[in-house]
Image (cartoon, rainbow, N blue to C red):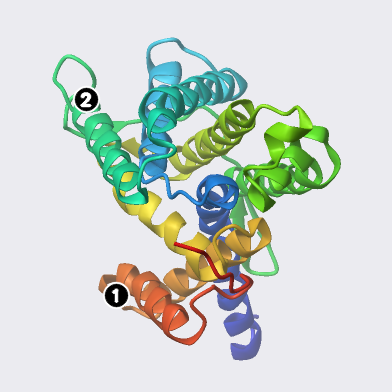
Amino acid sequence: MGASPASWKEAVVIQQIVNALMLGSVYALIALGYTIVYGIIRFINFAHGDIFMVSAYIVFAAVSYWKLGFFGALVAAVVGAVILGVTIEKVAYRPLRKAPKISLLITAIGVSLFLENFVALPLVMGSMPKVVPSFIPIISYTVGGVRFTSAQVIIFGLAVVLMALLGWFIRNTKLGRAMRAVSTDYMAVPLMGLSVDSIISSAFAIGSGLAAVGGLLYVIVYPMVDPFMGIMIGTKAFISAVVGGIGNIYGAVAGAYLIALLEVLVVAAGYSTWRDAVAFGLLIVVLLLKPSGLFGKFQKEKV
């Protein structure tokens, strides 16, 4: 006997929720990088999406050329992304830390364009998309009419663990408390004997590492990389952070899953061409109704 219409509809809804959890996990990991850096120094690192892109290429190289497995590709991507993120902060952003915000913004856009076009060089990776070979066994399961795979379990499970660890780290470690101190009173931190430069570099390292994990998880399900993939995925993650309340790590996660759910539902309803418009539409609505984001707090800043 076939399933009843009600149970069939429930299975379809649950299936879309499963798909949204997978996509939202990737958005969330990248969005956390935006929100950590902004929460500390009030700066939006527009090159963050391209760190995600570079990490995806590192995964491609790790499994295609170096014949590494899941854990080897994960370590290579995280190490490469952390080095890249910290280098960008030291070389491009630190000399401009006391400059007008517009200078930092222009520099971030310049770094983003440089990374995209550098990777697209024929002697580097080229501009054509590359297919990432499968590097984990994909096993399908069906429970109550809902289909999910081992890849989806790995993506959601790893993302949740990392997000929980980040929350614990920010609340309970010395470095986490130092990051919150810099966010609260940037000028007072040196008086406590703490190095602001080291704290900010650590924030970039953590954000870049999370973006690398996001890159690894993304190519598991969408096994293709190109030099400009960071533009759209990075933009969606940035929107997630703004919608949730940029500077709030829990808000960034909530915004990521909300946008992923809306995108998946729009596609399931047969309006796939509107998928990208949903995220931007939600951003406009949130900025009009609650400019600080769903979980953000309004703060006055002296200019």
Mark 1 is surrounded, within 10 Å at the Cα level, by few (under 14), some (14 to 19) or many (20 or more) other residues, namely few
Disc on res. 274: 1
| One can see residue 159 in this view | yes
The three-letter code of the residue at mark 2 reads Phe
Q: Secondary structure at mark 1?
A: helix
> Residue 228 vs residue 178: left or right?
left
At 38% across and 12% down in the image, what residue appears?
A: 65
Residue 10: name its quadrant. Answer: bottom right
> Residue 63 location, x and y as percent?
45, 19
At a point 39% along the width and 43% down the height, the residue shown is: 49
Query: In the rendered view of the protein, which quadrant contains the C terminus?
Result: bottom left
- At label 2, counting other C-alpha atoms closer than 10 Å, the crowd grade (few under 14, some 14-19, many 20 or more) is some
The residue carrying mark 2 is 118
Q: Nearer the viewer, residue 258 or 270?
A: 258
Where residue 275 sits, quadrant-wise, is bottom left
Say which label, 1 or 2, has the lower sequence index. 2
- Between the C-alphas of marks 1 and 2, the distance is 31 Å
Residue 56 falls in image quadrant: top left
Question: Relative to 245, is 165 above or below?
Answer: above
Q: Spot the residue most to the top.
A: 66
> Residue 52 appears at what percent x and percent y?
42, 37
Position of residue 244 relative to residue 173, above or below, is: below
Residue appearing at x 38%, y 35% in the figure: 96
Q: Position of residue 81 (x, y in %)?
A: 48, 26
> Label 1 amino acid?
Trp
Residue extending farthest right: 172
Q: Is residue 171 above or below residue 194?
A: below
